[in-house]
């Protein structure tokens, strides 16, 4: 619920404070068809604990219960997702059989490869000049001369190719993967229900598809960076002769020179197979590290964007690889695939991705013009979570809610440090058992970004943010960070309590400094400034890639950020509703960890209850 304080509000402060601290009852009124929280397959109440039906049955059930409004576009998408789910059940069995055959083939091929290597090594060990003993002295000299004329590395490349050709004959060709069913690419306006429908589908795949992942754009890009770092580190480690990858060579009964040759052949094979880093990253991208799974059959990707050169290259390379190896993609975006890269960055690479998407996905427009999040009903019993404007009364009510929530959480307010990706960490000034408090400047006025916001969202189910200003041209970099922050709070289903100078609808309208978007002004921004702004917003450790000058103008003044602001407003509105808030205790990871007694934080130092933000 959003509260605006007028002069007369002081007379009702006590009553409103009581409402702010109270819990609300589940609503029985019909709810709009967008922005529902994760795990919608649990929404039926009496069906909880039973294996859910497909997306279409779930959608129609929620409509019949009055929890969704029927929408023709959404029902069509639900039907398509339902059909895909049925095809995936058969595809999963086919992929299991394929992976079994592939594992056997890989194992047999590796054994045969090492056997061939050992045969070559024995021949070289037996013949001091590394030439077959049956050949004459003149042949040996000619062979030596020929080898001396070869360019460095060519001889090893020829040996590698000849060995691979022999393996094809001995082991046979690689097993052929089954034909994957076509995935879906959903695009449309803010609040049209794209993410809701994708999450319905993702929830329904539980227990049906073993290997599945769901990513939002920010999280995916950060994980790509992390995997790239891991691949580079692994390559550096494997260059060492003491690497475990080469340990099988040390115990062989060969001279040191022969072992050195074997080591060189192994390193060459490894470098050849890992030549393209994005392919190596793609092979790691869908791995469930905790369960040590070999890959994934389904990837759900929310908010596909191409905001800079790195995003174009990384997404093109990784998605093309995954789609080529049988992964089924269900994606959402505000744009059709052909409109993703209107600035033409890395055009040839992007066209390859478009071709692969056309081949493997059906495009569906979720064409409703309605932002359903704006229609989610509230009533007088709904908790107040957005206080505006900033007055002494609204600040008092904000402070009262902080005290009430932290009292319920145990009252032990501490300053803690939480881990962030790439070995970084972030100081949390006030933390209390899953509840954290910040001011706007701390979160958005410094060079932090998606990695930090994801870390906060994963660790805290309730976040207080005070002193949120109106976004204008003067603070456009802070505004972009705030958009990213809202995206991650929403994606991780956090409860957000705000103290702001204006209503949600007026938050991004600009002030006397001018509107947030001014094309002529942005046209004169330097590339260096653009790179700095992009790096600050992303804050991906020490890795940051800035857009081209053309791309920067388009990104900062064009449709991409206008859509992002509309999405942020729409999500902020939904985050005030009972539909969203009532599910935070059930679906946020930090709540589940606390229920299981798992420790979340470290490096505590106690501070007083009245300490400033």
Image (cartoon, rainbow, N blue to C red):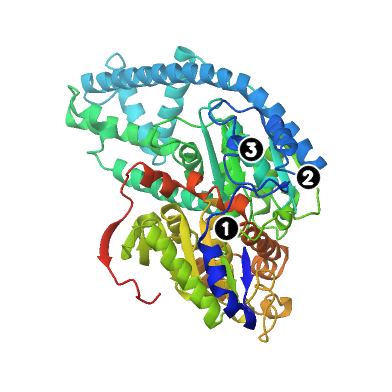
Mark 1 or mark 2, whichever is nearer to me? 1
Q: Nearer the viewer, residue 136 or 17?
A: 17
- What residue lies at 62% left-to-right and 70% top-to-bottom? 3
Distance of mark 1 from mark 2, alpha carbons?
22 Å
List x then y, in percent, for residue 425.
35, 61
Distance of mark 1 from mark 3, alpha carbons?
19 Å
The residue that label 1 is drawn on is 487
Mark 1 or mark 3, whichever is nearer to me? 3
Determine whether the residue tagged by mark 3 lies in a helix, strand or loop.
helix
Looking at marks 1 and 2 on the same chain, the residue that comes earlier in the sequence is marked by 2
Q: Quadrant of residue 141?
A: top left
Distance of mark 2 from mark 3, alpha carbons?
17 Å
The residue that label 3 is drawn on is 200
For the residue carrying disc 3, how many other residues have a C-alpha within 10 Å: few (<14), some (14-19), or many (20+)?
many
Q: Is 562 situated above or below 396? A: above
In-image side of 100 versus 202 (left or right): left
Q: Nearer the viewer, residue 607 or 322?
A: 607
The residue that label 2 is drawn on is 365
Question: Is any atom of residue 501 visible in this view?
Answer: no
Quadrant location of the C terminus?
bottom left
């Amino acid at each position: 619920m959003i509260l605006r304080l007028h002069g007369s509000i002081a007379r009702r402060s006590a009553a409103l404070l009581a409402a702010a601290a109270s819990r609300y009852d589940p609503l029985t009124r019909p709810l709009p068809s967008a922005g529902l929280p994760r795990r919608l397959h649990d929404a039926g109440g009496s069906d909880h604990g039973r294996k859910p039906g497909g997306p279409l049955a779930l959608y129609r059930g929620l409509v019949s219960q009055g929890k969704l409004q029927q929408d023709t576009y959404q029902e069509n998408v639900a039907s398509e997702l339902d059909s895909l789910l049925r095809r995936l059940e058969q595809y999963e069995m086919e992929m299991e059989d394929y992976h079994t055959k592939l594992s056997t083939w890989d194992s047999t091929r590796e054994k045969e490869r090492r056997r061939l290597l050992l045969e070559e090594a024995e021949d070289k060990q037996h013949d001091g000049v590394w030439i077959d003993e049956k050949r004459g002295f003149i042949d040996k000299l000619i062979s030596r001369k020929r080898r001396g004329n070869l360019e460095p590395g060519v001889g090893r490349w020829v040996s590698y190719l000849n060995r691979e050709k022999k393996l094809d004959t001995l082991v046979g060709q690689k097993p052929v993967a089954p034909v994957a069913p076509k995935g879906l690419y959903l695009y449309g306006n803010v609040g049209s229900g794209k993410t809701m429908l994708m999450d319905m589908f993702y929830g329904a795949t539980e227990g049906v598809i073993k290997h599945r992942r769901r990513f939002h754009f920010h999280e995916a890009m950060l994980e790509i960076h992390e995997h790239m770092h891991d691949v580079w580190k692994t390559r550096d480690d494997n260059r060492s002769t003491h690497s475990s990858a080469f340990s099988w060579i040390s115990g062989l009964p060969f001279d040191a020179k022969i072992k050195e040759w074997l080591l060189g052949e192994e390193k060459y094979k490894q470098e050849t197979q890992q030549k393209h880093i994005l392919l190596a990253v793609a092979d790691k991208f869908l791995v469930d590290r905790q369960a040590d799974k070999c890959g994934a059959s389904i990837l759900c990707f929310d908010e596909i964007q191409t905001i800079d050169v790195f995003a174009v290259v990384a997404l093109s390379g990784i998605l093309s690889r995954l789609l080529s190896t049988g992964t089924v993609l269900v994606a959402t975006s505000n744009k059709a695939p052909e409109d993703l890269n209107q600035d033409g960055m890395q055009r040839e690479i992007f066209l390859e991705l478009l071709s692969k998407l056309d081949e493997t996905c059906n495009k569906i427009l979720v064409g409703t013009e309605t932002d359903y999040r704006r229609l989610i009903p509230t009533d007088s019993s709904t908790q107040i979570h957005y206080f505006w404007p900033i007055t002494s009364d609204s600040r008092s009510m904000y402070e009262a809610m902080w005290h009430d929530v932290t009292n319920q959480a145990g009252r032990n307010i501490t300053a803690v440090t939480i881990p962030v990706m790439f070995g970084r960490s972030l100081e949390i000034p006030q933390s209390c058992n899953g509840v954290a408090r910040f001011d706007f400047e701390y979160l958005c006025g410094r060079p932090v970004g998606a990695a930090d916001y994801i870390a906060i969202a994963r660790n805290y189910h309730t976040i207080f943010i005070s002193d949120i200003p109106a976004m204008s041209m003067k603070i456009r970099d802070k505004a972009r960070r705030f958009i990213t922050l809202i995206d991650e709070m929403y994606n991780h289903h956090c409860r957000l309590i705000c103290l702001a100078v204006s209503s949600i609808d007026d938050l991004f309208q600009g002030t006397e400094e001018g509107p947030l978007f001014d094309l002529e002004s942005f046209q004169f921004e330097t590339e260096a400034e653009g790179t700095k702004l992009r790096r600050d917003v992303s804050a991906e450790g020490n890795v940051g890639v800035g857009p081209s000058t053309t791309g920067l103008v388009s990104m900062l003044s064009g449709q991409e950020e206008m859509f992002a602001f509309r999405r942020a407003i729409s999500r902020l509105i939904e985050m005030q509703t009972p539909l969203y808030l009532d599910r935070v205790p059930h679906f946020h990871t930090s709540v589940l960890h606390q229920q299981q007694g798992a420790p979340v934080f470290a490096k505590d130092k106690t501070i007083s209850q009245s300490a400033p933000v």
